[in-house]
Amino acid sequence: MADTEAFDFVCAELEARTSLDRLAARGTVRIALKQAGLDSRSATPEQLAVVVEKLLTAELTNRGILDAVSLCAQVAQKVRRLQGSASPETPDAVFRRLGG
């Protein structure tokens, strides 16, 4: 199962707006998700927005990212806009659709 669109979006934003490379950005977001008891393969845009606001700020500050509070507020606002986009299909839904 692939990571959610919201997870990929947050990671891409961090890559574009910080000195973190792809691996570091994805790992940092995964750490914050783990602290919240969530997984990158199932987190919704709203869940990710809350994690970005509440937990990711500290992780980015620990990694030397300046103005992490402002950055996280902006990223959280953007990821909430994804709320209306399609959510990932669960394995059960795939099997039901395929008739299995």
Image (cartoon, rainbow, N blue to C red):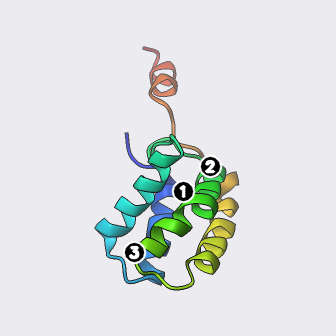
Which of discs 1 and 3 lies nearer the camera? The answer is 3
Q: Give the x, y percent position of residue 71.
A: 59, 78
Q: Is residue 42 left or right of residue 83?
A: left
**Marks 2/3: CA distance?**
22 Å
74 vs 85, nearest the viewer: 74
Q: Secondary structure at mark 1?
A: helix
Residue beneath disc 2: 47
Residue beneath disc 3: 63
Q: Quadrant of residue 30?
A: bottom left
34 shown above or below 22: above
Which of discs 2 and 3 lies nearer the camera? The answer is 3
Q: Give the x, y percent position of residue 89.
A: 51, 36
66 shown above or below 51: below
Q: Secondary structure at mark 3?
A: loop
The earlier-in-sequence mark between 2 and 3 is 2
> Contact (CB < 8 A) between labels 2 and 1?
yes
Q: Which mark is residue 6?
A: 1
